[in-house]
Amino acid sequence: MKQAMSEVVRCFGVAWQLRVPFVQSHLVFNLLLAAAFAPLMAGTVHLALKLSGQPALADFDIALFLLSPVGFVAGVLIVGLALVLLTLDVSFMMAVALRDREGKSRGFLDGVAMVFPRAPAVLGLAVQFCLRLLVMCLPFLAVCGLAFVSWMTDYDINYYLSFHPPKFVQTVVVCGIALALMVALVVWRTLGWVLALPLVVFDNRRAGEALRESQARMAGRRVEFLGRLAIWAGLGAVVGGAALFVVGVIIQFGLYFVPFGLKGLAAFLLLSTALWALLNLILTSLTTGALAVAFMGFADWPNAGQKRELPKAILGGVVAGAAVVTLLGGFGIAELMRVDQDRPVAVIAHRGASGAAPENTLAAVTRAVEDQADWVEIDVQETADGMVVVVHDSDFMKVAGNPLKIWDATLADLEKIDIGSWFDPSFSSERTATLEEVLLATKDKSGVVIELKYYGYDKDLEQRVIDIVEAAGMVDQVKIMSLKADSVAKMRALRPNWTVGILASASLGNMWDLDVDFLAVNSATMSRQLVRGSQDVGKEVYVWTVNDALSMSGMLSYGVDGLITDEPALARQVLADRKTLTGVERLVLGLAGRIGLDVPHRGDDDIQ
């Protein structure tokens, strides 16, 4: 242990000696990531989608696509590119350390020149690595899938996630054991391959040959390397975490006690963010550099011999790319500040005002109307007797402890089930509402966004919804959406003039190219590009589910057209408050959210 600690400390010492080229290399890597490799990965996705005949895919369609031959190849290639990105940074630093050890120049451009010509070989290594990992993981994943199908398909998944019954615990235990064994095997095998990267980059070995030689060299040394890796991670976490914590405390202290107005606060946050970013750059450069030195030491400092030369045009491209990324970053901040805050933003009550009343009930719908929601979002399904009812899950286990499936129930059955007491006893009178009842409660007060839910037992859901909406005279007050692209297409075919949208928690490709009028996307996947691309072709973007003021403000900074939230009253207040802020002041909120700060409340007298 003492020897391992000494060796790791030595690696950090070398990293400190090479701190300048290491920081430069790390910075170049991040700029290349933004300027070249991220678009390359996006281009790979778009090419694969073009071959599949689809402009974009969401959620379940992504899984089906990845199971197809084109999708599988694309998936492996994309993961391979991602691994190249992960290894490129440490490869630059390994090259710098190697040049320094040979007593030659140790500039970061030398590292770039040594690594870039071997990029195709590194991609080949990454693809082989992915395929080998996939073969290792499949049996364990099959066990997890079998456990899930055997024990967690009797009731809706939301019941299991909410109440954790014995079968849920049983499944978690079995899957946990299987995944733990899988991780152990993957770690053990990966430890045998850790030397493959330096062998490919610096000894010109082919991927398969490098993997085999690495495994031979690591025989009997895996535990030793794992110990050093653990010490490296521990030291890096302690030193880096402590430094960032101290800086964070200083910044937070300044936010609360430095007496200046909101515009001054914005300047302070900009300076603090720059300091935070610089410190993070230095720390990650040193820790990654120490890891690179450790890799090269275990690989006995392989050397391809003669120094590789990189064409000046490529080196010039690196510099130009850095300038472009920096410029685009500035434009990006400026664009966020220029987002038109006077443009209308819809408040969409998620399953009604479900933060104040049980979801998808008339009480939640009524509360949403009272909270001045522009739209009330609900989920609809068909009953056994052909009624369209408002309910999210496939059964009532979560909201009533009742296993009755929606498609097996009649309206008379549903009138006996209390779906409100789980939220609060005061809602014990709540029963499953019909779509017709919700439309009557909202007509001429709030619009209704209807999500079509499918569990494989629907018969004629789209047409039945159409008939109910038209009978209520609310065609212009209704929007339809679904997770299933084919059901959206069916609704479009049945009623071309209705407003329809796609709901997505994950996506591939340009979602705005789909034949829909709006997109409803998960907040985790939100980007300014998505909003701008959609709005440029006349499609609105709604984001779900945002329930706190800072998250709402952050999404509004992207320029979204609607907030889907459990808290419509709060969303209405946030919209009103933001109208009183300048672009700089809105930027303050965004910066604070990105680095996890709590912006203190300041009175109007502080605003200059």
Image (tube, grey):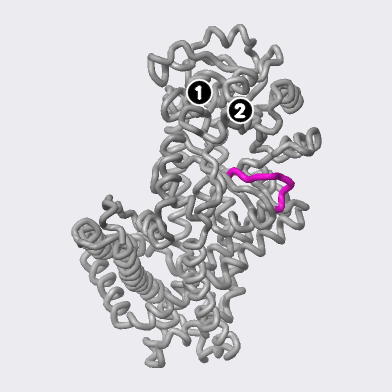
Q: At numbered mark 2, what does the secondary structure look like: helix, strand or loop?
A: loop
- The residue singled out by tag 2 in the image is 444
Picture layout, residue 415 above or below residue 177 = above
Mark 2 surroundings: few (<14), some (14-19) or many (≥20) residues within 10 A? few
Mark 1 surroundings: few (<14), some (14-19) or many (≥20) residues within 10 A? some
Q: What residue type is labelled 1?
A: Thr
**Which of the two marks, 1 or 2, is nearer to us in this view?**
2
Picture layout, residue 151 above or below residue 38 = above
143 displayed left or right of 497: left
- The image position of residue 299, as x and y in percent, is 42, 74
The answer to which of marks 1 and 2 sits earlier in the sequence is: 1
Q: Give the range drawn in magenta.
A: 513-521
- The image position of residue 589, as x and y in percent, is 38, 55
Location of the C terminus (image quadrant) = bottom left
Q: At numbered mark 1, what does the secondary structure look like: helix, strand or loop?
A: helix
Residue in the image at 59% along x and 21% along y = 438
